[in-house]
């Protein structure tokens, strides 16, 4: 039974009781991402606080992430886990976590994730065995990356 | 083949045991040695050995570029290709010069849509298809993207207006505004013979009758009908019919556009190049007669031969028997899947004017998650919006799970589906 490996209890817990769900203000940018193969979608907001004495850049702290979405357990749980992981971190740390998670998703089930970096997100290792589901797991993460980029661009402009 | 005689007459079911022996893939296992229960023929069908052998036989014995060269292999290849066209034409009650081979059904629809916009800049005699501001194209809310997006694009290119028939709650076409929707401004009505999501078989006659009154053309998307029921173009009164090979036991890479002879003759080409020309000069060219006008480049002869073998296979079984078999499976599925607590069928719940695509939603389980549990048990279905996003939006659902049947499916396959849905409900804790 490979299902239990994929749907670890952490994933089902986040799906049933999502964290930080429901759009909140203030926010610096909002991104709406859709998975065109299934129609699942997420709208995700990011609020950033600049590092002391600095403009909004990679050292800014992610002060809030909120989201609304509809989709499968994998996409919803993954977005919930993301908010736990990245709120309170700097943008640079968040990008490192995103890279680690993306790498895990591309590992075809053979990844050995660093639990210090990915925490609850290590539970998604089973998903990487199913190519059709990787997009589900990455949906919220791509929206986060997009929203953060928009925030930084706005600052630059 | 004695399939016609060896079925189970009381039930309408075919002798699937014999049929399944022709499909090598159906005896394999998936995901930890689970027997394969293939319920995704609406997306693509499996292929019998007869089709694979025909394609391999062409490559092994007759392979050459058709309609080119004068050597013996070129003659044999051309003969095989044109014989295949005759077989396929006969399968839908058509003449072979009205059958155009395309890459797939999507290209067949695009061929007509692009011929209509290309008409604006075509030479004398090929401008009759022109559309522009004030003209209307009519589709339906239940269309597959392949029979929707090309018409959106045509309207964007030409300034014509796209209109559509709504779908009722029960998954039928709402024809109450037929007289208004199809009017003197309508150039073409394009719709599915059978919905790939709802299974609904649409009332072709009612729509074509109105189209004839106002002089509009009719294109029928027959991707889900030609593989599953007897279809005879001489009885349909449509102008164009599009379908794909891979959904009817044939190879990938081949689709068919059937069109009325006089209409094809009046259409400018869509894709240009070799084979489709009359005379070529450095500055201009003239076109071959249909169907060659629409078959630029070296054509897919091995696939045409494979598709002809698929038509032969289906004809030997009998399309009436295929339809009856699927009808029995559909009735059984509607009854037993529909009876599961927490499951709702999307589309007509009675097997009347309805084919073997059964879509449904399960309370509190997203189709992706449901599909994962089904797959874990070897039950292979389609999940998502099935390339009919506007239909799902209209029905207020993000996605559905679809089981679709063919002549090799059994009542036991449906039982496996039912048991797998219940297993998913247990797994996700939504039902005891």
Image (spheres, helix red, strand yellow):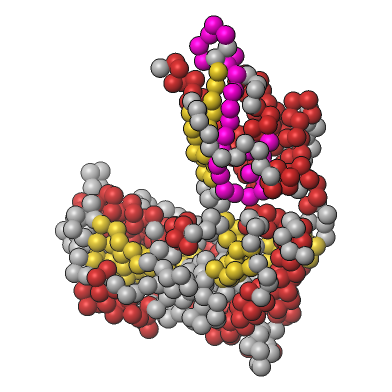
Residue shown at 53% from the left, 37% from the top: A23
Magenta highlight on residue B151: no
- The answer to whether residue A26 is above or below residue B236 is above
**In the rendered image, which quarter is residue B222 located in?**
bottom left
Q: Nearer the viewer, residue B366 or B273?
A: B366
Residue lying at the far top in this picture: please name it. Answer: A53
| Quadrant where the N terminus of chain B is found in the figure | bottom right
Tell me which residue sits at (54%, 25%) in the image: A47
* Residue lying farthest to the bottom in this orientation: B10
User: What x and y, as percent, mark residue B364?
Assistant: 65, 58
Residue B57 visible? The answer is no
Residue pictured at 74% horizontal, 66% vertical? B422
Which of the image's four quarters has the C terminus of chain B? bottom right
Q: For residue B63, what is the image quadrant?
A: bottom right
Which residue occupies the extreme left position in the image? B124
Residue at image coords 32%, 75%: B176
Q: Residue B252: x and y, percent?
A: 55, 60
From the viewer's perspective, is B333 left or right of B105?
right
Residue situated furthest front in the rendering: A25
Q: Quadrant of residue B318?
A: bottom right
Taking the magenta stretch, the answer to whether it contains residue A71 is yes
x and y percentages locating residue A56 in the rendered image: 51, 15
Instruction: Classify A111 as above or below B159.
Output: above
Give the magenta part as a residue range. Answer: A52-81
Toward the viewer: B236 or B90? Answer: B236
- Horizontal and vertical percent position of residue B288: 30, 61
Q: Can see residue A116?
A: yes
Q: Specify whether B237 is left or right of B49.
A: left
Horizontal side, residue B360 vs residue A29: left or right? right
Viewer-nearest residue: A73 or B163: A73
């Amino acid at each position: 039974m490979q299902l239990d490996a994929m749907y670890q209890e952490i994933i089902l817990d986040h799906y049933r009781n999502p964290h930080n769900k429901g759009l909140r203000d203030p926010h610096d940018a909002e991104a709406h991402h859709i998975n065109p193969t299934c129609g699942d979608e997420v709208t995700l907001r990011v609020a950033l606080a600049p590092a002391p004495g600095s403009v909004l850049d990679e050292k800014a702290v992610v002060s809030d992430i909120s989201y609304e979405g509809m989709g499968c357990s994998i996409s919803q749980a993954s977005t919930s886990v993301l908010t736990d992981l990245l709120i309170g971190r700097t943008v640079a740390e968040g990008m490192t976590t995103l890279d680690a998670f993306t790498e895990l998703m591309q590992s075809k089930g053979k990844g050995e994730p660093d639990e210090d970096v990915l925490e609850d997100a290590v539970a998604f290792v089973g998903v990487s065995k199913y190519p059709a589901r990787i997009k589900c797991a990455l949906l919220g993460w791509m929206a986060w990356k997009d929203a953060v980029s928009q925030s930084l661009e706005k600052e630059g402009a | 083949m004695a399939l016609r005689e060896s079925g189970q007459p009381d039930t309408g079911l075919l002798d699937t045991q014999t049929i399944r022996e022709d499909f090598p893939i159906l005896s394999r296992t998936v995901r930890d040695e689970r027997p394969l229960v293939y319920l995704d023929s609406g997306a693509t069908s499996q292929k019998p050995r007869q089709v694979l052998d025909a394609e391999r036989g062409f490559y092994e014995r007759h392979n050459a570029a058709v309609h080119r060269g004068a050597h013996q292999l070129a003659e044999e290849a051309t003969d095989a290709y044109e014989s295949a066209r005759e077989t396929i034409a006969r399968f839908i009650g058509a003449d072979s010069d009205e059958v155009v081979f395309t890459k797939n059904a999507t290209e067949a629809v695009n061929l007509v849509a692009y011929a209509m916009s290309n008409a604006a800049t075509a030479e004398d005699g090929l401008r009759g298809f022109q559309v522009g501001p004030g003209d209307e194209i009519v589709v339906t809310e239940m269309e597959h993207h392949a029979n929707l997006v090309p018409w959106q694009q045509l309207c964007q290119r030409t300034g014509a207006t796209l209109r559509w028939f709504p779908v009722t709650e029960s998954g039928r076409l709402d024809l109450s505004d037929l007289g208004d929707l199809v009017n003197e401004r309508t150039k073409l009505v394009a719709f599915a013979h059978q919905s790939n999501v709802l299974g609904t078989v649409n009332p072709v006659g009612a729509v074509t009758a109105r189209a004839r009154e106002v002089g509009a053309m009719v294109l029928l998307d027959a991707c889900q009908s030609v593989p599953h029921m007897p279809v005879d173009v001489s009885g349909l009164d449509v102008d164009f019919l599009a379908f794909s090979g891979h959904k009817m036991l044939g190879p990938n890479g081949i689709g068919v556009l059937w069109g009325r002879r006089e209409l094809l003759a009046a259409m400018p080409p869509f894709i240009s190049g070799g084979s489709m020309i009359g005379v070529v000069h450095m500055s201009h060219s003239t076109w071959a007669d249909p169907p060659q006008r629409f078959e630029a480049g070296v054509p897919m002869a091995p696939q045409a031969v494979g598709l002809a073998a698929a038509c032969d296979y289906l004809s030997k079984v009998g399309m009436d028997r295929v339809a009856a078999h699927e009808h029995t499976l559909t009735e059984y599925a509607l009854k037993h899947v529909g009876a599961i607590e927490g499951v709702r069928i999307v589309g007509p719940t009675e097997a009347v004017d309805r084919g073997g695509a059964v879509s449904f939603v399960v309370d509190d389980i997203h189709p992706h998650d449901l599909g994962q549990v089904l797959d874990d048990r070897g039950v292979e279905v389609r999940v998502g919006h099935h390339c009919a996003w506007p239909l799902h939006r209209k029905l207020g659902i993000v996605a559905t799970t679809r089981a679709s049947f063919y002549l090799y499916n059994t009542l036991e396959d449906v039982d496996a589906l039912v048991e797998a849905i219940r297993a998913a409900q247990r797994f996700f804790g939504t039902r005891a």
